[in-house]
Amino acid sequence: PERSAEKIFVIGLSRTGTSSVHDALGVLGYRSLHWMNDLTGTFPDELDFDLFDAFGDINISADFESLHARYPAARFIWTQRPVDSWIRSVSTHYENFVGISDLKELAGSAYAQGFGGRVGEIHGSLYSNHDSWASAHAAHTQRVRSYFADTVPKTLLEFSLMTGDGWEHLCRFLNCSQPDQPFPHSNVGPGHQQWQTFPLLQQRLFEKKASRRSPTGISKRLGRFFSPLPRHTLQTSTR
């Protein structure tokens, strides 16, 4: 594997715009995974890290230090939002999605048993080992700032959709030209949260796995992941 390859890791907490940045990276031509590989239905593994360009969601955020050690040329995008707004959004999300009213309940939830218990480990690292959403937010902030304080400049981008960041901020960091289209805003508002309860999610994943096993499903996903994609790069870019 080419460990000097430039990878992009999105390391924000839940409800900070990681899905929007994932979609934006796709527009820019990066092959991006968010949460899991939709083809295999699993978290990114060694092969995925070699094949894809960008990765995001809290399974990446929980492990960013080891990913940087593995890919020292990688760039990191830290998605953020104001803490009060984040607490309202993330607590509502987990209440609707998992059925918990306190983050301490995450550890014992059925949701935490997903992916062989890996979901519980991720949520313990970022959330349920802390006393409150506010302390979880503060701990992640301190962890990111402390780790990247002495890294090479331009390794980390702080990115906040809620305070106006968009194509200009992202494309300057990635040294690429800006697309002529609005910046994606994915998973916005209560409409996203209302349907995505855990039992419904289990049903949808079962249906998707069945679809993936069909020849048509496999062909479509292989085409999606491995067909040539445009690059919105500048002449000065090394990509």
Image (spheres, helix red, strand yellow):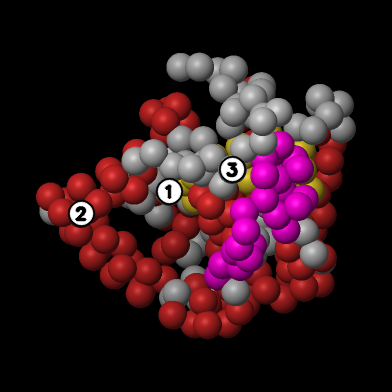
Residue that badge 2 annotates:
217
* Towards the viewer: 104 or 207: 207
In reply to whether residue 178 is colored magenta, the answer given is yes
Q: Is residue 122 visible?
A: no
Name the one closer to the observer, 161 or 44: 161
> Which residue is labeled 1 in the image?
36
Q: Which residue corresponds to mark 3? A: 232
Residue type at the position of mark 2: Gly
Real-space CA distance between mark 3 and mark 1, rounded to the nearest whole angstrom: 25 Å
Q: Are marks 1 and 2 in contact (CB under 8 Å)?
A: no
Please give the range of residues in magenta: 166-187
Residue found 29% across the figure and 45% down from its top = 223
Q: Residue furthest front?
A: 235
**What predominant SS class does the magenta segment belong to?**
loop
Counting from the top left corner in percent of width and height, residue 222 is at: 27, 43
Depth check: give the residue in front, 189 or 137. 189
Residue ID at (72%, 58%): 166
Residue type, numbered disc 3: His
Say whether marks 2 and 3 touch (CB < 8 Å). Answer: no
